[in-house]
Amino acid sequence: MATDYDAPRVSQDEQPGTESLEAMQAQRGGSQTALLDVEEADTAEGIDLPGADLSHEELLIQVIPVQDDEFTCMSCFLVHHRSQLAREKNGNKYCSECEG
């Protein structure tokens, strides 16, 4: 007898039955409630609300301006290397990802 090693090996117990959705929910124990995974460190202090006063905050990263061999795509507004330039129309440059 030939054996097909590529065929999935599923026993009769593991095969999904043709039970209705209501029957499967009844086996699980009825309704389910959603549980949130909240840590103690997740407090309101870690959330920035829109319109919050951030004038006392300091920028912690160094911002590097666009280099000569880079351009900003006018569709996705990401900075790309000039090798990804797909087209230029009316002075606006578009990347190959947006034009593809």
Image (cartoon, rainbow, N blue to C red):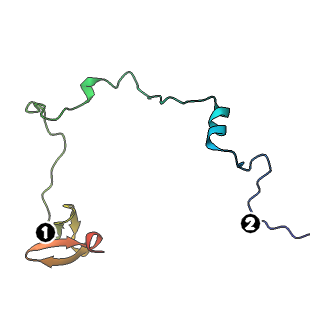
Say which quadrant the C terminus sits in. bottom left
Q: Quadrant of residue 32 in the image?
A: top right
Disc 1 packing (10 Å; few <14; some 14–19; many ≥20): few
Residue 47 vs 98, above or below: the answer is above
Q: Which residue is mark 1?
A: 68
The answer for how far apart the CA atoms under marks 1 and 2 are is: 54 Å
Q: Amino acid at mark 2?
A: Asp
Disc 2 packing (10 Å; few <14; some 14–19; many ≥20): few
- Looking at the picture, how far across and down is residue 98, in whole percent? 26, 69
* Camera-nearest residue between 14 and 79: 14
Q: Which residue is mark 2?
A: 6
Q: Is residue 40 left or right of residue 46?
A: right
- Looking at the picture, how far across and down is residue 18, in whole percent? 70, 49
Q: Amino acid at mark 1?
A: Asp
For image coordinates 13% across by 33% down, the residue present is 57
For image coordinates 19% across by 78% down, the residue present is 87
* Camera-nearest residue between 10 and 55: 10
Q: Quick one: SS at disc 2?
A: loop
Q: Quadrant of residue 55 in the image?
A: top left
- Looking at the picture, how far across and down is residue 61, in whole percent? 19, 44
Residue 85 vs 17, above or below: the answer is below
Q: Quick one: SS at disc 1?
A: loop
Q: Quadrant of residue 78 in the image?
A: bottom left
Q: Is residue 91 left or right of residue 45?
A: left
